Image (cartoon, rainbow, N blue to C red):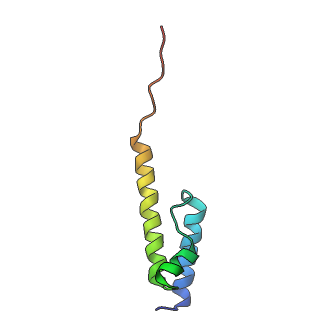
């Protein structure tokens, strides 16, 4: 599975989707993944998983922060 072309293509498609639709900075670069874990499918999957978790955390944080109350002067 280390060099499975179908697995690599699936992870590449997932990476592109995260890069296109998630906040900037949640997914480390493919080069960084390769430096940390080597060019393995597991390393790429781990980076993608971390990006998904970071995105969900940001969305949850945004939904719990209430906007300031309007300033009402009579």
User: Which image quadrant for residue 17?
Assistant: bottom right
Q: How many marks?
A: 0
Is residue 7 depicted above or below 24 in this figure? below
Is residue 58 depicted above or below 28 in this figure? above
Residue at left offset 58%, top offset 65%: 19
* Residue 62 at x, y percent in the picture: 45, 45
Query: Which residue of the protein is positioned furthest toward the top in this rendering?
Result: 74
Left or right of 18? Residue 49 is left
Left or right of 66? Residue 29 is right
User: Which image quadrant for residue 30?
Assistant: bottom right
Residue at left offset 60%, top offset 62%: 20
User: Which image quadrant for residue 13?
Assistant: bottom right
Residue at left offset 43%, top offset 70%: 49
Residue at left offset 54%, top offset 72%: 14
Is residue 15 depicted above or below 42 in this figure? above
* Residue 27 at x, y percent in the picture: 52, 66
* Residue 43 at x, y percent in the picture: 46, 80
* Residue 66 at x, y percent in the picture: 42, 35
Return the residue nearer the eye: 21 or 25.
Answer: 25
């Amino acid at each position: 599975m280390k060099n499975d072309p179908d697995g690599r293509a699936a992870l590449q498609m997932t990476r592109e989707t995260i890069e296109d639709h998630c906040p900037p900075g949640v997914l480390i670069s493919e080069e960084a993944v390769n430096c940390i874990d080597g060019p393995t499918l597991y390393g790429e999957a781990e980076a993608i998983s971390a990006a998904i978790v970071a995105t969900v955390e940001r969305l949850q944080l945004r939904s719990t922060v209430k906007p300031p109350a309007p300033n009402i002067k009579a």
